[in-house]
Amino acid sequence: MYKRVLLAYDGSEAGQKALLDALDIAQWSHAELHLIAVMPPAAPLVAIEGAFYDAEMEAEERKRYESILADGLRRLREAGYPARGEVLVGDQVETITKYARDIGADLIVVGHKHLEGWAARWWRGSQSPALIERAHCNVLVVITH
């Protein structure tokens, strides 16, 4: 039985399906449900004159991730389930696994969309296999097509 479920939420179609599955699992097992939205670290913009950091662009990106997280938390509240949430900054796999360890999660839930064609899969890559290898607990990958 799960006591603490962590959902890495990105607001995508796959993420929304993962949210519903995480909600079902949390309700069934009476588990705490935690949501995180993982924002990639700000990369310097490169120009002819050199690289520079755009704080305004990073603030806009943070607002976007906060909005994604707020949407997920709202959906859970509307379903009658309280959850905690936080926007984190860092590498997805590292951040998710560290946060899961820090809260003592029994299960990590992520959404994943199958890509069509070998070129799309090769170009985009996938975080799911790396997450499964690094996680200290069970991982549920909710798949959409």
Image (tube, rainbow, N blue to C red):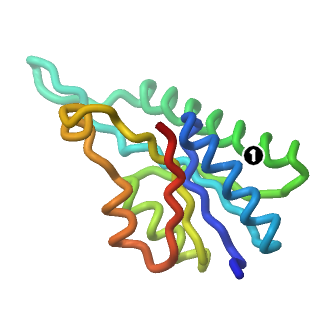
Residue positioned 17% across, 26% down in the render: 46
Give x and y (percent) for residue 139.
Answer: 50, 68
Question: In the displayed structure, would residue 60 be above or below residue 143?
Answer: above
Give x and y (percent) for residue 145.
Answer: 47, 37
* Label 1 neighbour load within 10 Å: few <14, some 14-19, many 20+: many
Residue positioned 38% across, 60% down in the render: 93
Q: Nearer the viewer, residue 139 or 72?
A: 139
| Direction from residue 47 to residue 66 in the image, left or right | right
Q: Which residue is under mark 1?
A: 73
Quadrant of residue 40 in the image?
top left
Give x and y (percent) for residue 48.
Answer: 9, 17
Give x and y (percent) for residue 18.
Answer: 61, 50
Residue projecting furthest to the left = 48
Question: What is the secondary structure assignment of the residue under circle 1?
Answer: helix
Residue projecting furthest to the top = 48
What amino acid is labelled 1 in the image?
Leu
Residue positioned 24% across, 27% down in the render: 45
Question: In the displayed structure, would residue 108 be above or below residue 121?
Answer: below
| Direction from residue 67 to residue 10 in the image, left or right | left
